[in-house]
Amino acid sequence: MGSLVWIGAAVSLAGLAGLFWCILKVWKARSAGLSDDELRDAVRKVVPWNTGALFLSVLGLMIVIIGIALT
C-alpha cells in the first residue's frame, strides 16, 4: 500500500503543475494588454483546465489518504 501513497503524490503533483500552467496562461493574457472581451475569452478558455487540474490534485490527495489509512 506504500506505492499507493507515491501514486497519489504523483497524481497530486500533476494537478499542481496544471494549476501553475493555468496561472501562467492567465498571467500572460493579462500582461499582453488585451481588451476586456479578449481577456474574458482567454480566461474562459482556461477555466475548464483549471477545474480539471484542481480535481486531479484533490483526487491525488485522496489517494494518498487512502494509502496511508490502509498501511
Image (cartoon, grey):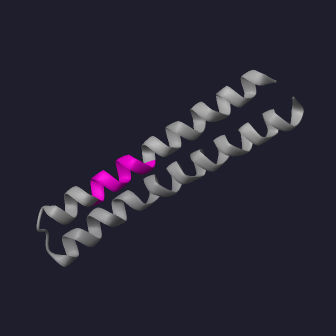
Q: Which residues are magenta?
A: 19-26
Task: Locate residue 41 relative to residue 16 in the image: left or right.
Answer: left
Task: Locate residue 56 relative to residue 39 in the image: left or right.
Answer: right
Residue at image location 51% in from the left, 37% down from the top: 14
Work out which quarter of the rendered image holds the C terminus and state it.
top right
Q: Is residue 62 magenta?
A: no
Report the residue that reaches farthest toward the bottom: 36
- The dominant secondary structure in magenta is helix
Residue at image location 58% in from the left, 46% down from the top: 57
Task: Locate residue 36 relative to residue 17 in the image: left or right.
Answer: left
Work out which quarter of the rendered image holds the N terminus and state it.
top right
On screen, residue 43 above or below 18: below
Residue closer to the observer: 52 or 69: 69
Residue at image location 21% in from the left, 56% down from the top: 28
Q: Is residue 24 magenta?
A: yes
Report the residue that reaches farthest toward the left: 33
Whole-percent x and y of residue 6?
66, 27
Whole-percent x and y of residue 62?
73, 45
Residue at image location 44% in from the left, 50% down from the top: 19
On screen, residue 11 above or below 62: above
Residue closer to the observer: 54 or 3: 3
Task: Locate residue 65 relative to residue 38 in the image: left or right.
Answer: right
Whole-percent x and y of residue 48?
46, 57
Q: How many marks?
A: 0
On screen, residue 33 above or below 68: below
